[in-house]
Amino acid sequence: MKPLLLAGALTAGLALTPAQAAPVKVYFSQGYGIPGKVVPVSRTSPHAGVARFAVEQLIKGPTAAERRRGLHSELTGKLRGRSDCGADFSLRIRKGTATLRFCRTVWGSGLGGDARALRTIEVTLKQFPGVKKVVTLDKNGRCLFDQTDRGTSCITGRE
């Protein structure tokens, strides 16, 4: 069964019947290279918001069996503080760009961990047709983990 991929449904949480449950892939890190190897695992979204569900699964992290296979998520346990949007993140997909904005503070784990986190987000969201670019922002609207003065390298492609 192919994922249900309606433009508005990528971010909406529309209820599906069990027969309509949508399969989705979540890409976790394997090893500690920079940006590292990513490995897909299968999940089933209980609603048509497959892109939102996939990011939720990245934050949740791999199952115990997947961890035994060496898979991990650099996002698990890294969100701190209060949300400014009522959730862990907001996600908008428009004109080929998926914009993921975290609504809580995301604690980095160093250059390698940060690169792996961004890589898993990008690969997970680019599985969806129509997503050509991924912009990942922190709570303040700056590019996640961007330490430059402007903090816009993920948007402009320049530091």
Image (spheres, helix red, strand yellow):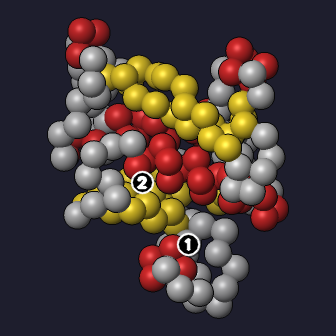
In-front residue for pair 60/119: 119
In-front residue for pair 125/137: 125
Q: Position of residue 55 (x, y in %)?
A: 49, 42
> Which amino acid type is marked by label 2?
Ser
Quarter of the picture containing the N terminus is top left
Task: Name the residue rendered at 53%, 85% in the picture.
Answer: 158
Q: Position of residue 123 (x, y in %)?
A: 50, 48
56 to 88, vertically: above or below: above
> Which amino acid type is marked by label 1?
Cys
Which residue lies most toward the top here? Answer: 19
Task: Name the residue rendered at 49%, 80% in the picture.
Answer: 157
- Between circles 1 and 2, the one closer to the viewer is 1
Labels 1 and 2 touching (C-beta < 8 A): no
Using the numbered discs, state the Cα–Cα distance from disc 1 to disc 2 in whole angstroms: 14 Å
137 to 56, vertically: above or below: below
Does residue 126 appear to the left or right of 123 in the view shown?
left
Residue at mark 1: 143
Q: Quadrant of residue 143?
A: bottom right
Element assignment for label 2: strand
Q: Position of residue 118 (x, y in %)?
A: 60, 57
In-front residue for pair 118/35: 35
Q: Position of residue 145 (x, y in %)?
A: 66, 68
Residue at mark 2: 90
